[in-house]
Amino acid sequence: MYSDFIITGIYLVLMFAAGLFFSRNIKNTSDYFLAARSAPWFWIMGSIWATNIGFLHGYLAHGGAAYEWGLIQANFEWFQGPFGYILSGIFFIAFYWRAGIFTVPQFLERRYGAAISTIYSFAWLIIFVVTIAAELYLGGMFLKNILHIPFWPTVFVLTAVVGTYTLLGGLGAAIMMEFVQFIIMMLGTLPLLFILLNIVGGFAGIKHVLISQWGVSSQYFTVLPDIHHPYGPGPWIILGQCLVVTLGWCAGHQSMVQRNLGARSLYDAKLGYVAASIPKTLGAFLYIVPMIAAPIIFSQFGIFVEKSDAAYGKLILNLLPQGMVGLFIAGLLSAGLSSISSVLNSSSTMVIKDFYERFFVKGKSDHHYFIAGRIATFGVIAVSLLLVPVVLKVYLIMWLEQTLIAMVLGPFMGVLMLAIFWKRANTPGSLAGFLTGGAFAIFMQQVMHINIFFQISWWSFVVTLAVTVVVSLLTKPPDKAKIEGLIWESDFKAKLGVVVSQRAETNGTRVLAVPEIKIHKPAWYLNLKYWATAVLLIQIILLFFFG
Amino acid sequence: MRKSVIVLAGLLFLFVVTAARGQEKFIDVRQSMADNLTAVKTAVKAADWTAALEKFGKAREIWEAGVKPIILGGVKSDTQFQEYFGRIGEVETGFGVIGQLLESRNGAEVEAKVNAVIWGISHHPRGFNVPEPRYTVWDWVFGLGIGLGFLVFAIFFGLKLRRSYYRRYLKTPDRGKG
């Protein structure tokens, strides 16, 4: 126990010191919000995965949902890799990159106007604050269970560590820290899989016990269950997850996109995103497969588990030897802190760029916004801390966050797809579509009592598409000059963002210098096509064996 | 003004912390019961029957005074408690058997019975209650027809667009000067 305490303490002190070290050269908003556009592809890869995988979307809540529902939860790994990471890396990031933006809502603003981007920013800010609160709660509960230390002091220590380096270092420090944490996570948490599989006799052993001896349905072991499944029917996973949630998450989640915008070139941004899909896919073996074996271990060894979100912590506490638990905690804390840090940094970016600079204090110096960014970071984490007790009341944290996201991602994907691929989509159409789609998602959840968030996402996406098309056709088409460079067919005319940049300056909007797009022949092992093909092959093999 | 803001923020914080503590109670009492039952196993392994009986008594007391009342009270208003309500009989039978085994100093089956009681107060996966698959024509129509069909289309269409974009880009005389 003492060795675990010491390892955890050393880890937290090192993370704190490393954060301060990485933050020493941060001087302006470009450094703070976009890491001075200097990150190479492998930093982006590690950072994206570490951002995506935390307490909430990885080990604890996501793993908890796997404990609850089985292998179906792996669809987040095995479908988000090819359909989210690769498609977003190849298509959507190029648009954001060329537009020289800080935030996704800034792209929406240039294509559709201020109203829709403000609503979108506000919705995401709510999700981000809830996400940080959930991450803090899960981290506090995890350490309470493992090290038997009180919940609230733990939450405050976690907040202080992650808050300080994010507040001081911005995206630059966050990306570098996340890369380090990516390696610690991988190395620190992989041993559990082998220890577990050794105890239960491999994946076949898990299936044998649960299906043959306990009489559990074979649907516990499939990623695409039938249409009657209460949590994630297969058809809705394909329609809602693959086509809407996954793409919307990867192309619309500020934390994910912001890491790509901090890359040193467009190629690095794309390759970083595509390469990140490999650890994303393999992540299922770190926290999904172990959690499917967890019920056998708990019943066999008499381990008490109070709720699914706590199951992962109970597993490592009871299976791993002392000392190794400390290393494991370091790996898990890396996951949690990196996710909190990225969402925190993205929230402050949105607060400053999408609200403060746009509506409250315009035309101030870069230094002013840089300081305001740090204050916003502090404000966001303070509000999140106050929300932790509210999150405590939610039975399955993953459900809360997924429901909120379902209400935003369907409408977002509807207007984004039309923004990029349909010239005729205009401001009134998109606004009507976005609001109707969002309202329909709430209606489905609150009035029709549909709790399958893939289904909500799909239908809100369809409603948004339909309303946007109809209203756009009934109203004036958008000004051609205004949308030049923002839709696929004509983006090469924009001469890599010059038109966008000039128009933005005319409108008085502050933009970054549009980065140069370097077309170069990469070494064969950095070829985007090879990486994408490798990911797709891994997916096919996994689905063949486990699907 | 500043003082009143600080006081209000402090009061708000105290309120939420107090509210949160109530939520933790159901977890804490079950954890305490499980810890005592685990101690029973350890004591039986060491053939310390007095300690085993003492820890067993404590676990039973926590069950009677802490866990069971919360389940009985909670099940009326919160569906979360339904799974535990359904296992009350199982847990009480388990207590009866363990009590008899300890009284007769028969340690052979204590561990298995204690593990069963701990598992009885633990949260069970809801996926265990899902029926066997009943794939229908709608699964194939939605899933394979619309879903996978659209995905294949999106990938090929996207690759085509990307290729045409770079072809046009490479023909642009002032490329890279943006």
Image (spheres, helix red, strand yellow):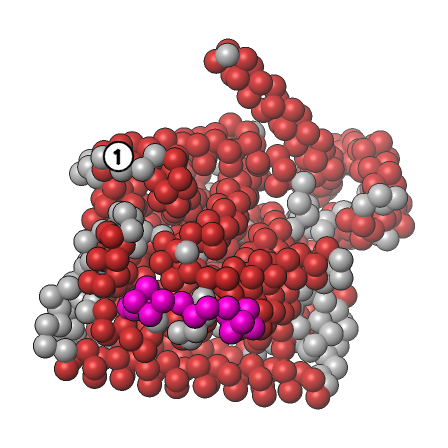
Instruction: Measuring from the top left, give residue A541's x and y in whole percent.
Output: 46, 81
Residue A307 position in % (x across, y down): 67, 48
Q: Position of residue A454 (x, y in %)?
A: 61, 67
Q: For residue A480, which quarter of the picture?
A: bottom left
Q: Is residue B88 placed above or below A62 in the rendered structure?
A: above
Give the residue at x 30% y 67%: A481
Q: Where does residue A521 sit, x and y in percent of width and height?
A: 14, 76
Q: In which quadrant of the rendered image does the C terminus of chain B lie?
A: bottom left
Left or right: residue B175 compared with residue A192: left
| Vertical placement of residue B89 versus A285, above or below | above
Mark 1 Cα shell of 10 Å, populated few (<14), some (14-19), many (≥20): few
Q: Which residue is nearer to you in this view: A91 or A44?
A: A91
* Amino acid on which the number 1 mark rests in the picture: Lys
- On whether residue A481 falls in the magenta region, the answer is yes
Residue A88 vs residue A119, the one in the foreground: A119
- Which span of residues is magenta-colored? A470-486
Asked whether residue B27 is drawn in magenta, I would say no
**B65 on left or right of A208:** right
| Most foreground residue, A84 or B56 | A84
Residue B97 makes an appearance in the image: no
Name the residue beneath numbered marker 1: A364
Q: Does A218 appear above or below A380?
A: below
Residue B102, quarter of the rendered image: top right
Residue A281 in the image: above or below residue A503: below
At 60% from the left edge and 63% from the top edge, which residue is drawn? A437
Query: Residue shown at 81%/50% (left/top)?
Result: B79
- Residue found at x 68% / y 29%: B19
Q: Secondary structure at mark 1?
A: loop
Q: Which of the pair A266/B103 is nearer the observer? A: A266
